[in-house]
Image (cartoon, grey):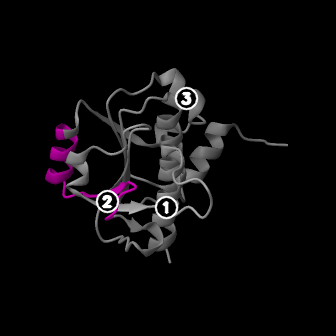
Amino acid sequence: MRTQTRRERYSEKLKSAKRFPVSLATINFRHEGNVAYIIRAAACFGAENVFVIGALPEQRTLRALSGSIHRFVNVECFKNVQEFLDKMKNNNIKLVSLELSADATPIQKYKFSSNERICIVSGNEETGVPVEILKNSDKIFIPMQSVGYCLNTAQAANIALYEYTNRVTR
């Protein structure tokens, strides 16, 4: 039987929680759950920020879908892609986009570094990552061994964040 509330457990874990120089970005997600799931992953894996290009779901929705850990992650919204790109450039944050393209590197071959701040960009559910961001990004993809060739955008971001934290802590 648990003797602590969820908030008490989070507060206790926060004392030893690791933080990494990595952020996640979403682009005009159509499904509110995907934004919440990315925020949850960011909190679990120690990401610095979640950058949301477009609308952010209501706090009530975020709280319900993120497992209430949304308050442990800095979330910043941008009106458009250019505003986001300006922020990344001004803060010297390297962009790494999850995108199925001919020039993308398989994620297991990509060299993540803990010596630089990066932002893993997960594209819109239907249209992917905008060209303006791709032109300013390294591009990675998650190879699929079976009939499917792409994952849900939040799932892909979770895998990329796991790969990043796993490699930089070795």
- Point out the tag, 1 or 2, that comes first from the N-terminus: 2
Element at label 2: strand
Residue 96: image quadrant is: bottom left
> For this rendering, which residue is in front, 67 or 28?
28
Left or right? Give the position of 141 relative to 94.
Answer: right
Q: What residue is pinned by disc 2? A: 118
Q: CA distance from mark 3 to mark 2?
A: 26 Å
- Specify start and end residues of the magenta stretch as a single range: 82-103
Q: Are marks 3 and 2 in contact (CB under 8 Å)?
A: no
> For this rendering, which residue is in front, 166 or 148?
148
> For this rendering, which residue is in front, 74 or 38?
38
User: Horizontal and vertical percent for residue 21?
Assistant: 35, 60
- Point out the tag, 1 or 3, that comes first from the N-terminus: 3
Element at label 1: loop
Q: What residue is pinned by disc 1? A: 142
Q: In the figure, 120 relative to 115: above or below?
A: above
* Circle 2: residue type: Ile
Q: What residue is pinned by disc 3? A: 63
Residue at the spot 45% in from the left edge and 21% down from the top edge: 58
